[in-house]
Amino acid sequence: MPVASFLIPSEKGDEEEKEGEASRKNKPEKKTLLVVARSFGCPFCQDLAASLATHAIPELDAAGIPLYLVSIGTPETGKQFSELTGFPQTRLLADPGTQTYDALGLERGLAAAFFSPKTPLAIARRVSTAGGRKGLGEALGKWKAFLPPRILKDAQFQGGAFVFVSKKGEKEEENATAKCVWARLDKATADHAPAEELLEVALAVGRR
């Protein structure tokens, strides 16, 4: 399934990205973890991005599994989001038109966005550990309310996470094929899987 988003360009980290791609291209199958956030201005998404950058990307890179984060907003806002959270621009995609969200069938609605009882429960889970309290506290302390292009419509979307496995064609001229082997759709604001869980799933799924 194509992701209709825009990779945010950055000179920083380009060499590391090329080296990682070179180490993966000879493998017949490649796993990719795609995390979808609600928007660049969501404080819980800023917390998630910072946590992914610290607790998931280094180990996934070592395993040859790239992680990409998609969020609603413009590439310009995405650069500010990257600077704020420490999430690498080379792994960040901006989707100002929400094509990714529509294609992946993600949750949408005012009730899930603002009135779901799952939101306080998710926050309670996040702050139940010392690391979670620290991460969320830091995110809220420096929160930037980046507004999405269509405020009322875009604020209703939820995120999710997906593991895709792509396989090269048997012949050189054949295109690679990809399938989703694991998916998690967030049901309410803040109801995303923690970085540690996403790391565990990405490493484990598809093992024989």
Image (cartoon, rainbow, N blue to C red):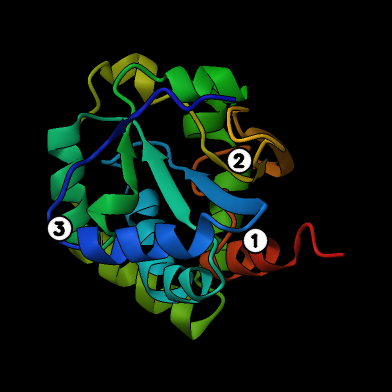
For disc 3, the marked residue is: 83
Q: Which residue is mark 1?
A: 202
In 3D space, how far apart are the residues under numbered discs 1 and 2 (Cα atoms)?
17 Å
Residue behind mark 2:
186
Label 3, label 1: how far apart the Cα atoms are: 25 Å
What is the count of numbered marks? Answer: 3
* Nearer to me, 161 or 122: 161
> Quadrant of the image for the C terminus?
bottom right
Instruction: Name the image quarter holding residue 146.
Output: top left
Q: Secondary structure at mark 3?
A: helix
Task: Between label 2 and label 3, give the one nearer the viewer.
Answer: 3
Q: Residues within 10 Å of mark 2 (few under 14, many from 20)?
A: many
Q: Position of residue 112 (x, y in %)?
A: 56, 30
Can the viewer see residue 110? no
Q: For residue 135, which quarter of the picture?
A: bottom left
Residue depicted at x 67% and y 52%:
28
Viewer-nearest residue: 95 or 118: 95
Examine the image and state in which quarter residue 99 appears: top left
Hey, what amino acid is under mark 1?
Answer: Ala
Q: Position of residue 120 (x, y in %)?
A: 55, 52
